[in-house]
Image (cartoon, grey):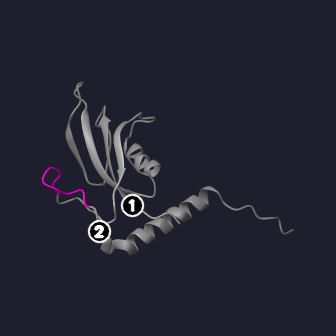
């Protein structure tokens, strides 16, 4: 069973057509004036962490340019002087192991529905 881990990501946003419910900030602009965003997510892998961000963008086939995607240790927090915590931002700490476990179970059940087992016909 894969365990949820915190990830810290940054990417170039060529548009602002997204809805992210994880803690995120604009950390500047690139040479073309596009926003550089940072976000902290919980995921089971780097691929899934990037997928969370991709799925937050409304434009289909959004080709995001990730600057980095770093796995962080359990207990890490994204909040600091540069990236302060806003009132709406929720972040799990080590005390939320039960919540992480529940989310993992939901993900497993969802994955099982995508690939249901094949049963022999009992007739």
Which circle marks residue 31 in the picture? none
Q: Residue furthest front?
A: 73
**Looking at this view, is 1 or 52 the one in front?**
1
Image position, residue 98 (x, y; %): 39, 75
Question: Which comes before the other along the chain, label 2 or label 1?
Answer: 1
Q: Which residue is mark 1?
A: 5
Image position, residue 111 (x, y; %): 57, 59
Residue at the location (82% across, 65% down)?
121
Q: Which residue is mark 2?
A: 93
> Which quadrant does the C terminus fall into?
bottom right
Part of the protein shown in magenta: 77-85
Q: Residue furthest left?
A: 81
Dot 2: few (<14), some (14–19), or many (≥20) neighbours within 10 Å? Answer: few
Secondary structure of the residue carrying numbered label 1:
strand
Q: Image check: 18 left or right of 55?
A: left
Residue at the location (43% across, 50% down)?
46
């Amino acid at each position: 069973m894969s365990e949820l881990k915190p990830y810290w990501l940054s990417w170039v946003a060529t548009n602002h057509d997204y809805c992210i419910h994880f803690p995120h900030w604009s950390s500047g602009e690139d040479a073309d004036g596009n926003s550089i965003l940072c976000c902290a997510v919980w995921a089971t892998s780097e691929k899934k962490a990037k997928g969370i961000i991709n799925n937050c963008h409304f434009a289909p086939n959004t080709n995001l340019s990730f600057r980095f995607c770093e796995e962080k240790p359990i207990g890490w927090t994204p909040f600091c002087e540069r990236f302060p915590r806003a009132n709406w931002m929720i972040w799990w700490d080590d005390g939320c192991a039960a919540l992480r476990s529940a989310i993992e179970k939901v993900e497993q059940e969802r994955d099982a529905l995508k690939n249901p087992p094949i049963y022999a016909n009992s007739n």
